[in-house]
Image (spheres, rainbow, N blue to C red):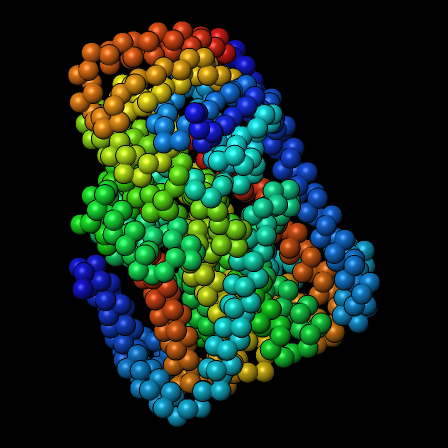
Amino acid sequence: MTEAPHVTLRGVRKVFAGTGATSPVDALGPVDLDLAHGEFFAVVGPSGCGKSTLLEVIAGLTPVSEGTVAFEGKPVRGEVPDGVGVVFQEDASLPWLDVTANIAFGLRHSGLPADERERRVRRALELMGLVDFAGSYPAQLSGGMRQRVCIARTLVMEPRLILLDEPFGALDQQTRLLMGDELLRLWRTTGATVFLITHALDEAAMLADRIGVMSARPGRLIDAVETRWPRDRDSRIVEHAEFGAVTARLWKTLREESLKTLGAQMRST
Amino acid sequence: MSTAVVASAASGRAQRMQAIRNGMLLVVTILLVWQGLYLWIGDIALASPLATVRYAARLLASDTFYPHLRDTMIAFVAGYALAVVLGLAIGFWLGFHRLSGEVMEPMVVAVYSLPKVTLYPILLLAFGLGISAKIAFGTLHGVIPIILFTLAAVRNIKPILLKTGRTLKLTPLQTVRSILFPATLPEIFTGLRVGFSLTLIGTLLAEMFASQRGLGFLLMNGIGLHNVEMIMAITLMIVVFAAAVSTLLLHIDHRLHQRL
Amino acid sequence: MTRLTIYRLLVVAAAIGTLEALCLAGAIDRITMQPPHEIARDFVRLLASGRMNGAIRKTLGNAAIAFGMALAAGVSFAALLHGMRALRATLDPLFATYYAVPVFAFYPFLIVVFGLGDVPQVLIGFMLAVVAVIVNTLNGLDRVPRVLVKTARVHRLGRLRMATAITLPFAAPYILTGVKLAVAYALIGVVGSEFIMSRGGLGYEISFAYTNFENATMYPLIVLILVISIALNAFLTAWEKRLLLRRGQR
C-alpha cells in the first residue's frame, strides 16, 4: 500500500510581479512533485532556473501564483508550517549570540521544559561537532562551521521536513564531501524528509534517493532519476558502478538546459 | 550602444525627477502643516505662511534690515574661508603624517560632540566683543568636519595611485595636481559641505548671544518685542537659505562620488 | 595603556602646560583667563560648595528628557517609516538637509510660543537629537539581511517577536551610533539654549558668570561641561566598540 506523500505540489507556478522598472518574471513552473516520507530528494538545474523559488514555495516563504502545495495533507499558504526546517545558502547565524544561544534560538518560545531544551542543544552540539565552540561567536568561526551552527539550529527543532538551499555552496570540495556524510547521518538519525538544492551533480548523485532535474527558466521538472542507493550509504558510494551512470544521465539532461540559459544570457547583452 | 547603458541613463533621469517630486511634495506638506497649526493656535503665537512670506519680503525691501544681513554674511564668509584654509591644512598634515593623525583624530572627534557654545565666552574674552569672536566661533564649528574628512580622504588614498605617479616620474606638484587632488576631491568636498552648514550654525549661534548686530541678534530682539512675524520671517529666510545651499552642495557631492 | 593613549595624554598635558606658562608669564592676562592650576582649584571649590547642584540637575535632567524623547520617538518613527517606502522617499530630502539648518534659529520662536521655561530648551535638544536617531535606526534596519528575516519566518515568529528577537538585536550597533549622536546633540541643544536665554541651568550659569566677570566661576563650569560631554562620549564609544568587536567588525 502506498502511503500518502509527505509533500505534494500540483500545477505550481510562480510569477514575480514587475515593478515600474522591470517586467514580470515567470520564475517557476508548472511543477508537479510528490515527496515520500523519509525520502532524500535532490534538485539540480541551471542557474536562475527557479530552484530556490521552488524551495521557498514548499517552505511557505513565498506564496504560489497558481497551483497547490500541501505538507502532511494540509495546504501551505503564506506561512511556514510547523515541522519544517530550512537551511539557507547565505550565512544565517545570529552574530550577537554565541553558538549555544544560536542553536537554542528556536527553542526559546517552544514551551519545552528547560532540561529538554538543554538536552537537545547538547545533542546538536555533539552531532555537528561544535562542542568545543559552544561559547564562541559566529564571527570567530569559519564559513563551514557557521553553516553547521545553522544546521544544528534547524535540527534542534526536530523538523519532519528539512529543506536545504545549496548549504555547502561556499565550502571547498573536501569539506563538502564530509558535510555530505554528516547530512546523510543526520537524515538517518532523524528520519526526516530531506529536500536539497545543489548545483553539484556529484553531490546530488551521491546523497539522494531521487534527483529532480529542472529546466531553464521558467523551471519545470523535466527528469527524475532514481538512484536506489542503500539507506546506510556515505560518500564512498562514488565507487559504486552505477554512480557514473547517474551523473552522466543528469549531465546529459542538464547540459542542454544550461546551454539554453547561457544562450539567453548572451543574446541579451 | 547596448540597451543597458541607455536604460541606466533613463533610470537616472527618472530618479532625479522622482527626487524633485519628493522634494516638492515635502515642501507642500510642510506648508500645509504650518497653515493647519496656524489655524489651530492663532495669531498670538504663530504667523501664517503667507503673512510670514509677506513680512520677509518687507524686510528684504527695508533699509534697516540689510546692515544686519550684511554683518551676518561677512562674519559667515570670513569664518568659512578661515575654516577651509585651516581645515585643509590640518587635515592634510594629519592625513599624511600617520602618527599625528592616529593620535589626534579621536580628540578632534571629541570636540565635535562638545557643546561648543560653552567655549564662546573664552573667544569673547580673547577677541573682544567685535566681529572677530563671531568669525572665530564660526570657524571653530566649521573646521572640525573639514579636518576629519580631509584626514580620511588623504589616509584612504590607494597606494597604487601613488605608485603610478612614481612610475610615470611625476614631480611632486604634478602628483598633487593630477593624482592626489582628483582622488581626494569627493571626500574633501563632503567635508567642505558639512563645514559650510556648521559654520553658518556657529555664526548664527554667536550672534544670538552677545551681539548687537546680525540676523541672530534680530531674532533675539524679536523675543523682547514679541514680534512673532519678524522672528518667523527671519527663521524662514535662514532655513530656506541653508536648505537650498545644502541641497545644491549635496547634489554636487553626489555627482563627485558617482564619478569615482 | 596603549602607546597612542600615552601620546594623547602628552598632547593634552603639553597644551595645559603651554597655557600655564603663558598665563604665568603674563602673555594671557587675568581678565581673559586665570592660570590652569587656579582653574583646577576653583573647580574643586565650586563643586564642593554645592552651589551648582541645582543647575547641574536642571541641565542634565532636561538633556536626559530630550534624549529620552528623541530615542523613543526616533526609534518608533524609524520602525514605522521602514515599512512605508513612499513616505520614506518623501521625507528623505528632509533628513538629508536637516543638520544643515540651524535648529537654534527656532529657539526664539519656541520661546514666544511656550514662554521662557524649560520647554523650549528640551524641545531644541529633542529637535537636534531625534533625526540622528531616525537616520541611524533606519540604516540599521536597512542592513538586516533578508536571510535573517526568512529565518524568523521559518521559526514562525510573529511580527513583534521578530522585531525583538532578530531585527532590533541586529540593528543594535547602528542604533547605538544614533544614541551616541543623540546624547551629544541633546546636551548641545539644552546647554546652548540655556546659554542664549533661560532662567537656569549650567549654560545660564556660564553666561551669567561671563556677564559678571566671574572667571573663577565661569572657567570651572566650562571645564565641568567638557568633562561631562567627553565622559559620556567615551563611555558610549567603548560600548559601541565592544558590540562591533563581538561581531568581528571594527
Front-most of A169 and C236? A169
Q: Quadrant of residue A212?
A: top left
B123 and C79: which is toward the camera:
C79
Q: Is residue A129 visible?
A: yes
Q: At 31% from the left edge and 39% from the top edge, which residue is drawn?
A: A190
Q: Position of residue A192 (x, y in %)?
A: 36, 36
**Residue drawn where x is 57% and y is 28% of the image:** A68
Q: In the image, A260: left or right of C17?
A: right
> Could you say which quadrant of the image residue A168 lies in?
top left
Q: Nearer the viewer, residue B134 or C111?
A: C111
Residue B73 figure quarter: bottom right
Q: Where is A219 relative to B141, above or below?
A: above
- In the image, A253: left or right of C64? left
Q: Where does the image place residue A149, in percent across and percent down from the top left?
A: 29, 44
* Relative height, residue B230 to residue B21 (above, below): below
The location of residue C143, given as percent across then percent down, is 45, 44
Which of the image's four quarters has the C terminus of chain B?
top left
- The residue lying furthest to the bottom in this view is C49
In-image side of B63 versus A59 (left or right): right
Can you see residue B84? no
**Residue at 35 percent of width and 7 percent of height:** A252
Residue A176 in the image, given as x and y percentages of width and height:
24, 28
Camera-nearest residue between A17 and B107: A17
Q: Residue at x 61, y 45 (%)?
A: C84
